[in-house]
Image (cartoon, rainbow, N blue to C red):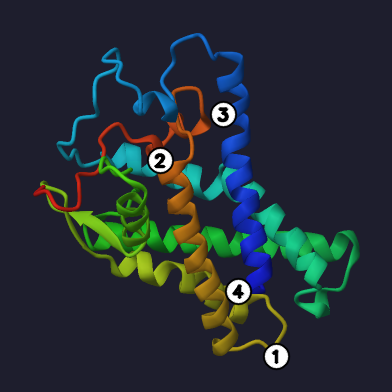
Amino acid sequence: MTMRGLVLLLLAIAGLTVLPPLAMAQSQADSGDSSSAAVLSTSTTHPQPDLTYTRPTEKTKLHNYFFDTLGPYPIVGAALAAGINQADNTPPEWKQGAEGYGKRFGSNFGIAAVSTTTRYALAKAFREDTLYYRCECKGFFPRLSHAVISTFTSRRGDDGHRVFSFPALVAPYAGTMTAVYGWYPGRYGAKDGFRMGNYSLLGYVGGNIALEFLYSGPHSLLSRMHLNNGHGAQDPGSQP
């Protein structure tokens, strides 16, 4: 995927994330439901999130794994990426038409599935919690920094202290390398897999930024999964 294609994909994912909740918010503007705007208000109706770290249960992690692997977001993401690849004719050996689009969709979905499986499996082996926790810090740049740093870190131990995450770093490249040596045309090699993995890693960064800043209130799909975790991440300057 080209850099232009990656930017278009991130913008499309952001749009898919924010448009349905915004429509819901407009229809319930006077209902008093919490939203990202409500966080900025002075109302005391809704309690602040508990900053005490609570390690997710195995059931929660299993649920999140299936959602991240087979849920609507990876399917829509694969469809959008396939459309961009189709427009760029990448790889050209798959040609155009419905058959070419099907190959590109299956490839992108497979890459995402392998990446997600690798991340969860290695996180299990390293006893890490790689779920995303929104920052309770204030200001645009501290929250942006938190989103970017969270791409390369995870939580470990009962206190949830943050550590550099080998699973989070390896997972994007595991997916693209599998594609290169599993089903891509023979002319592709490790260099191409590494390049594609860089784009996948940037995709994770963009996804975390979207999760940090976009609406994820009680009426969004995110509220049904870990990405709307009730326990916020502590301010970067505080102790776990």
Disc 1 residue type (three-letter): Arg
Label 3 to label 1, Cα distance in Å?
A: 43 Å
Q: Secondary structure at mark 1?
A: loop
Q: Are marks 4 and 3 in contact (CB under 8 Å)?
A: no
For the point 66% across and 47% down, the residue is 76
Q: Secondary structure at mark 3?
A: helix
Give how far across and how far down residue 126 sits, in percent: 23, 63
On the rendered image, what quadrant is the N terminus found in? bottom right
Asked which quadrant contains residue 156, the reply is bottom left
Q: Which mark is residue 187?
A: 1
Give how far across and how far down residue 162 sits, in percent: 19, 57
Mark 2 neighbour class, 10 Å CA radius: few under 14, some 14 to 19, many 20 or more = some
Give how far across and how far down residue 41 sits, in percent: 35, 22
For the point 60% across and 62% down, the residue is 110
User: Relative to 213, is 95 above or below?
Assistant: below
**Of residues 185 and 228, which is closer to you in this image?**
228
